[in-house]
Structure formats: C-alpha cells, structure tokens
Image (cartoon, rainbow, N blue to C red):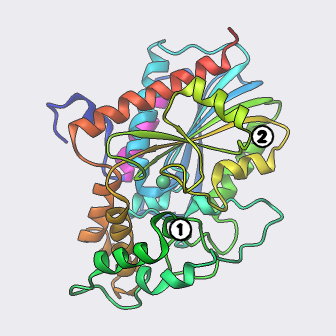
Amino acid sequence: MDESKPVWRYFANQYVTARQNFIDAAEATDGRLETLPISQLGPQDEQLSIDICILGSDNPRKLLLHTSGVHGVEGYPGCAVQVKLLERWAAGELEVPDDCAIVVVHAVNPWGMAWMRRVNEDNADLNRNFLPPDEAYVGEPERYNELNALLNPRTAPGGWDFFALRAGWVILRMGFNTAKQNVAEGQYERPRALQFGGPGLCESPKLLLDWLEGALEGVERCVALDFHTGLGPHGVDSLLISGEDGDAAFASLRERYGPTVQPLDPDAGVAYRIRGGMLDGFKSRWPNIDWTLITQEFGTEKPLKVIAALRAENRLTQWGGRPDKALLGSPERERLLDIFNPATDKWRGMIMLRGQALIDDTLSDLTPQ
Ligand SMILES: [Zn+2]
C-alpha cells in the first residue's frame, strides 16, 4: 500500500484485509453486523463469509441494498466503496428517513474474492446463478458452441495461441454484438467453461437469499445497487438497469440518475442480456416489492483484453494441473486482480467519487421531497 495516496488505504488486495476493513468500519457505526459463513476456506485457511451491515431503521419500509463481490475479485474495489459509505454514515454525513435502512452486503462470492477468481468454488459466475425458482439450470446461448473451442481450450497454457487474432476473426464473422451476447449471456451445460451459471443454486447465493427473506419483511420499496468492474470504457461508470422494459420507466431513471443509465440491449450499449442475474433473482423472488435494480459497472480495459485474461485464468485453473494454492500467485490470477481493480490514482479516485455519488442519488430517490 502506498501511504502517500489517501484513497489507496481503501483498496485491499487480500480477502482477510478487505473483510477486516469492512468489519472495522461497520463496528464504528451504530449499525448491526451479521456474518453468514460459507463452508469453504480461504488461502490462509481463513473462514470465508458474506458480511452484512444494517444501518438505519430496524423495520424499514424502504431499503437501499448495496452489494459487492458477486464476481469475487471485483469485490476489492467494491469493498473500498462500502467502507467509505460506512465511514460517511459514522460521520453523520448520510441521512435517511425514519422508515428507511441501508443494507451493505460485503462479498456475495467470498471464495472468488479470496482466491482471486471472478467465479465461485463451483466455477460458477454467481451473476448467472440466481435463476428464478421455477427455471432449470440447463441450456446455453444459441451460438456458444461456435465459440467454445476458442474460449475454452482443453490444454494447459503455454506458447502462442493467437487468441486475439482468432477472436478478431470470430467478431468479423459473427459481429461484435452477437459475439458479446453469446459469450456473456450465461451457460448451464459446461461446468469447466467460461460463463458457467452453476449446477444449481450455489451455497452463498442461497445463504444470502435466506437472509434476505427476513430482512425484506415489510419492505415496500427497494433500490438495489450491485457493484461491478470490467465492463465499459476505462474510468467511466455505466448504470445498467434490469427489470425495466417500459420506455417511460427508463426515461425516468435516466432523468434521475443521468446519462450513464444504459439498457441491457447488446446493440444499444456496453451491456448484454443475461440469465440468472442476481438483481433479477431478487425481483423474481419478491415480486411485490417495488424494485429499482441498478448494476453499477466501472470500465477498466477493452472487452477483448478482459476476455483474454478470464480465458487464460480459467484455462490454467481447469487444465493447468496445479494445486489451488499454487495458482494463487500465478500471473493469470494476478492479472485478474489488475484487470478488475486497476492500481492507478485516477481510476481509484473515480471509483470512490462515483460510487458515493450513486449512493447519494439513491438516498435522495428514497427520501420524499
Ligand atoms: Zn462483475
């Protein structure tokens, strides 16, 4: 850590440190702290858990739900934003109405965060794991099979394999937006491949959903902010709105949250439609709550670089033949941390600024004028 840079103290690069920062900040507030341990251990044999701090009303009708680390390694910048939020609360800088609470959920995928992966212990992308209760964990995008050999080589890493060139060819043939949609949508057929949505509802999503069952009792309105990195232009955040298909709803969100609001249509913005997204999973389980579902995505590197890094890391993990602990310090895992948590002043400063700005916008949304 570079002490000369004040925002850097918020950015840990180990799960134990990040979690401790979160716990310390939570304990300095007047809020409640709850811990949901999972059955897996971290690289230092530490207990892994989802940790939750509840601020404000004990029986809220309105809620701001802020989640981080659904994509493991993205939890490091997510934690930074949440620690800052907790500090601002402790300093009396945030105000909420009497019937409102803020629920801050640290590390929905603690295993991925601890082991520097984007997926969890089942190789599942947890933002593809929250299918509605009546939907089976089967299927894949129509053209995923055309991409499979390119994305998921079944050999140990080594040598040049001309990924960028071959990917460029696929993009030419298929079109960038079609390729993006087919890569990213989520698949439930290939457990060792990229964008696997899981064999069923995984342990940490289940723990979180069970906990929410109690926490959402009596809640009528909820704005859910899910923090992510790695999508969109470097240094810019996009707000991806799910569950809103009406033009009027979209227009009102644009008005409130500004031009960073983007649709999930792959032809109309940086994003794509997905199956099993966490926020939609909340909505499908509690349809009577009036939800606003916002994924805040901070861009880091260009899409092809992000995919290349994920592909290399998954290839090493699946086919490298090395034990888990030997993978932690590998260049492939270090690269993921770099891609999803860039170590520059400018990027980190922007995260801190825009992360808080969205929280402020949300709280004003929840406060009657
Ligand atoms: Zn993400």
Q: Residue at x 59, y 45 (%)?
A: 263
> Which of the 4 quarters of the picture holds residue 182?
bottom right
Please name whichever residue, 302 or 190, is drawn nearer the observer in this view of the structure: 302
Q: Count neighbours of disc 2 (C-alpha within 10 A) and say few if under 14, some if 14 to 19, many if 20 or more.
A: few
> Which of the 4 quarters of the picture holds residue 237?
top left
Q: Amino acid at mark 1?
A: Thr
Q: Are marks 2 and 1 in contact (CB under 8 Å)?
A: no
Q: Is residue 354 left or right of residue 262?
A: left
Q: Is residue 299 above or below residue 38?
A: above
Q: Is residue 27 left or right of residue 203?
A: left
Circle 1 is placed at which residue position?
178
Q: Is residue 342 left or right of residue 138?
A: left
Q: Which residues are magenta?
A: 15-27
In which quadrant will I find the C terminus? top right
Q: Where does the image place residue 246, in percent across and percent down from the top left?
A: 74, 39
Q: Residue at x 35, y 46 (%)?
A: 17
- SS at circle 2: helix
Q: Is residue 332 left or right of residue 356?
A: left
Q: Residue at x 52, y 84 (%)?
A: 146
Q: Count neighbours of disc 1 (C-alpha within 10 A) and say few if under 14, some if 14 to 19, many if 20 or more.
A: some
